[in-house]
Amino acid sequence: MKQFDTLTLSVQDHALILTIDQPKSLNALAREVVNDLEAFLDWFETTGYEYRGLVITGAGEKSFVAGANIVQMNSMDEATFLAYARQMHVVTERFESLQVPVIAAVNGFALGGGCELALACDFIYASERASFGQPEVNLGLVPGFGGSVRLPQRVGRAMARELIFTGRRIKADEALRIGLANRVTAPDELLPAAIATIAEIAAVSPTAVTIAKRAMVQMDGLDTHDALAREADAFMSAFHTEDSVEGRAAFVEKRAANFPGK
């Protein structure tokens, strides 16, 4: 298993669990963490697709990711500050585009950059202890790691504007109510819930999941007509796979499918 200075990896069933492991800083996105996230993605995209899903969480009981590293930001010049933001744009886009589903298991604070990292995942499971927010305005800043783009996609434009303009922090139950989180669990049930969902995904066609995810990412921002055209392309791409041949045959023959993953 690949080793990183600020991240730890573990495997349970079909899920690879990526833990941001900097509890003393509440798992803040220091440059070292961002560099390791890029290195992880390089590794995963070449060797990690044996896993059927990825779960991202934070070390400790307090924090998923508390945000950007403000102490480091204070020492940055303009060019370094912009490069920091752009590097996180690359990281979040790459997580968003992985061929397998990515679940954020938010175990505590998901603030600023932490909320933005969670938003780059396919969906979010939250502990009852979790809290979310884009508090950048309290520092005279605005979201810089994708929050102003992805938060409206998740909760709607008006709610996103309210959260960003006020910098308000919300608890897990409100995140569930507005559609930011898919599920809220007891703290000790958070990772098991995410792993169980990856197990459900592992029981279906890998190629279909990959095609569906790719198409849905590409549909974001398209009008209905263009999105339907993209869906038709995905539908035909799936139809020609070996998984589809096997799945349809299994249905007709009333047996369990044995998907080859092709």
Image: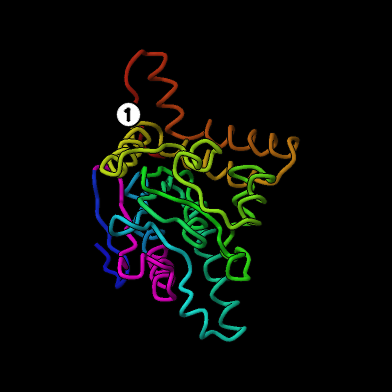
Q: Answer yes or no: is residue 120 visible.
A: no
- Disc 1 designates what residue? 258
Q: Nearer the viewer, residue 67 or 47?
A: 67
Is 169 displayed left or right of 130 in the figure?
A: right
- Of the pair 29 and 236, the residue shown nearer to us: 29
Answer above or below: position of 70 versus 202.
below
Q: Position of residue 34 (x, y in %)?
A: 44, 70
Please state which of residues 112 and 14 is positioned toward the viewer in this rendering: 112
Q: Helix or strand or loop: what does disc 1 sit on?
A: loop
> On the picture, is 220 further left or further right than 131?
right
Q: Is residue 255 above or below residue 200?
A: above
Q: Over which residues does the magenta segment extend?
A: 13-42
Q: Name the amino acid type tagged 1.
A: Asn
Residue 41 picture location, percent across and down: 41, 62
Note whether 8 is above or below 17 in the view shown: below
Q: Residue at x 32, y 17 (%)?
A: 255
- The magenta stretch spans residue 203: no
203 sits left or right of 70 in the view: left
